[in-house]
Image (spheres, rainbow, N blue to C red):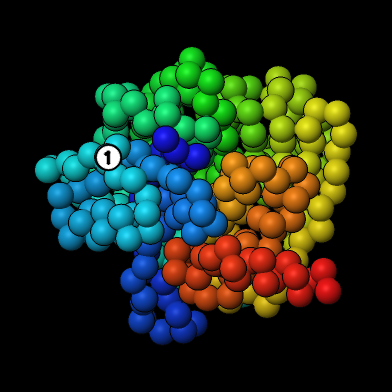
């Protein structure tokens, strides 16, 4: 059985390591894949559900998940579609993504992907806004996954991960709202919510989420200002850990995966968020979404040095 099963689109990553130069380091990305690898590095038993191309990149992903201990029984291979790809460029305002993903194998996923029965065997199902945005059939797959999780008593975790290049804001708002009502854990970022609600006040944002019908635990991510846990009873701020970030790609995914992993290991919400903050901070110290994801020993060291 599994602690966490995630569903979404993996993308090969080409990351510009020197500003202004045309040299790119190949790595791996895709928000929910990053999250599940982060969780596995914290000791969680994980599986991933997706569709990759029958190409070199698809094969590299299968090797990656296997080497990270992520179960691949729920990964389908598509003979006619490619594995998606994105570039990361670094500028004064942080990183920017350019995608080559339209028509990708993952965007062709359909609810039949869920027949492997993995969701029913997991404690958490982890999903994201990107998985709902890439295509209609992927969106249907996400809602079918939610229905399966609910029927089986698997808890649903949802990261907002809003990508306005993938869908219009009105559809994103309506769809994310519908999904957040079904989530036992909703992980929105303040940036994403600002696009959806038009306001930049964390308290009012949490009110909007609750008024919209979210009944589970909400962890609102405020970037440098940490996060706020709203468990339905109280709102608890948790400070962020400051680091000199080299590349923030995948930091939110590391937060999600580490948080879920620590919940599965019995942490309170506050302890799990503190741990996830430290893990996410460490994940920004190197280039790429996956390579710098820390392991449990590194996170514990970091937490000790902060406490001491
Ligand atoms: O959170 C990092 C991801 O955004 C990155 O790995 C690429 O999944 C990705 C996407 O669709 O933006």
Q: Where is 145 relative to 166, above or below?
A: above
Figure quadrant of residue 64: bottom left
Q: Which percent across, then down, holds residue 287?
A: 48, 74
In the figure, is residue 73 to the left or right of 170?
left
The residue closer to the viewer here, 146 or 307, is 307
Residue 60 visible in the current orientation: yes
In the figure, is residue 12 to the left or right of 42?
left
Quadrant including the N terminus: top left
Residue 168 visible in the current orientation: no
Figure quadrant of residue 176: top right
The residue closer to the viewer here, 75 or 21, is 75
The residue closer to the viewer here, 32 or 273, is 273
Neighbourhood count class around disc 1 (C-alpha, 10 Å): few under 14, some 14–19, many 20 upward: few
Q: Which percent across, then down, holds residue 73?
A: 27, 40
* Residue annotated with mark 1: 73
Name which residue lies at 25% across and 46% down: 52
In the figure, is residue 258 to the left or right of 10?
right
Q: Where is 299 relative to 227, above or below?
A: below
């Amino acid at each position: 059985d599994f602690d966490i099963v995630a569903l979404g689109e993996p993308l090969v990553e080409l990351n510009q390591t020197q500003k202004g130069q045309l040299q790119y380091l190949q790595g791996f990305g895709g928000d929910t894949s990053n999250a599940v690898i982060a969780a596995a590095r914290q000791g969680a038993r994980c599986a991933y559900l997706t569709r990759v191309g029958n190409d070199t990149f698809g094969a590299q992903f299968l090797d990656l998940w296997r080497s990270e201990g992520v179960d691949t029984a729920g990964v389908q291979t598509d003979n006619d579609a490619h594995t998606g790809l994105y570039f990361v460029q670094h500028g004064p305002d942080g990183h920017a993504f350019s995608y080559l993903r339209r028509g990708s194998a993952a965007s062709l996923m359909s609810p039949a992907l869920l027949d492997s029965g993995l969701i029913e065997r997991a404690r958490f199902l982890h999903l994201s806004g990107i998985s709902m945005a890439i295509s209609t059939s992927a969106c249907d797959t996400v809602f079918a996954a939610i229905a399966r999780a609910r029927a089986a008593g698997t808890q649903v975790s949802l990261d907002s991960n809003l990508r306005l290049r993938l869908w219009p804001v009105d559809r994103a708002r309506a769809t994310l709202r519908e999904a957040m009502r079904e989530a036992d854990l909703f992980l929105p970022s303040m940036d994403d919510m600002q696009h959806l609600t038009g306001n930049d006040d964390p308290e009012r944002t949490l009110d909007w989420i609750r008024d919209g019908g979210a009944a589970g635990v909400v962890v609102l991510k405020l970037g440098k200002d940490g996060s706020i846990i709203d468990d339905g009873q109280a709102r608890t701020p948790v400070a962020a850990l400051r680091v000199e970030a080299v590349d923030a790609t995948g930091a939110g995914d590391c937060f999600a995966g580490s948080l879920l992993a620590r919940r599965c290991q019995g942490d309170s919400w506050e302890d799990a968020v503190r741990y996830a903050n430290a893990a996410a901070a460490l994940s920004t110290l190197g280039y790429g979404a996956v390579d710098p994801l820390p392991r449990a020993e590194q996170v514990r060291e970091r937490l000790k040095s902060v406490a001491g």
